[in-house]
Image: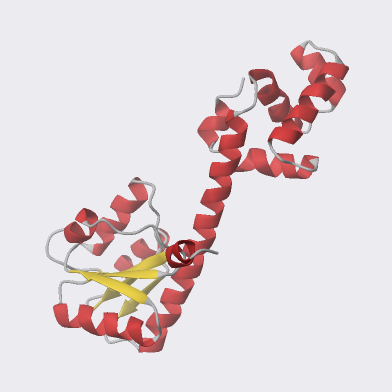
Amino acid sequence: MTVEVAEAEQPLVVIVDDDADVRGSLEELMQSVSIDAVGYSSTRELLEADLPERPGCLVLDVRMPGSSGLDLQQQLAASGNAKPIVFLTGHGDIPMTVQAMKAGAVDFLTKPFRDQSLLDAIAAGIERDRIQRAEARLVAEQTDRYAGLTARERQVMRLVAHGRLNKQIAFELGISEVTVKLHRSGVMKKMQASSVGELIRAWDRLPPEVREATT
């Protein structure tokens, strides 16, 4: 692994809190356990920042001037950037907690909180982000491979993924069973699938809009 790749895989915790003292103490806490951290005073400042593409999570204060942490959570979800979030608040209530957790928050901690509770939540957030990023890479790889299939191969792949036998595919597409086998072989090779099970998993990973475009 090159130095650049290793650095790109180092976790980065992003802290957003309008209290400079809180940001500073949280950044020091991250440094004490050898985790890189960067702090911002508002959600707007964060959205305007050019952050590196690294695994990690967000630590957000719920109540801030302007856009709140919950607002940012909604914005990120709408943009497809579902970065794991740990919420901090000094004014937490049950409805707010439920809203945050339903929207995918890792945890919701009320100030003052134990350092270890925050570190545990951040560790869970980083691990979730690693899993999400790995899955996103797989989806991108499968989508790129799928783009290399012919229209007929895509039809065959869809029908195989839906459990059709070669003779059923041949009947449905109006081609010979031999031709189906040739297309199926081509699909397996291009999708780098060594079994029907792998091919089905590859199909399931494709974005819905890609699958639905197959006729």
- Measuring 64% from the left and 26% from the top, which residue is drawn there? 149
Q: Nearer the viewer, residue 70 or 76?
A: 76
Residue 157: x %, y % from top left? 71, 29
Vertical position of residue 46 compared to residue 149: above or below: below
- Measuring 79% from the left and 40% from the top, which residue is drawn there? 196
Residue 68: x %, y % from top left? 21, 62
The quarter of the rendered structure image containing the C terminus is top right
Residue extending furthest toward the front: 2
Task: Give left or right: position of 152 versus 94.
Answer: right
- Measuring 69% from the left and 37% from the top, which residue is drawn there? 191
Residue 209 visible in rendering: yes
Vertical position of residue 77 compared to residue 25: above or below: above
Vertical position of residue 30 compared to residue 209: above or below: below
Q: Nearer the viewer, residue 1 or 48?
A: 1
Residue 104: x %, y % from top left? 42, 60
Q: Nearer the viewer, residue 48 or 110?
A: 48
Task: Give left or right: position of 53 versus 69.
Answer: right
- Measuring 69% from the left and 29% from the top, which residue is drawn there? 158
Residue extending furthest toward the left: 65
> To which quarter of the image does residue 113 belong?
bottom left
Task: Give left or right: position of 124 versus 35.
Answer: right
Residue 182: x %, y % from top left? 81, 23
Task: Give left or right: position of 49 versus 130.
Answer: left
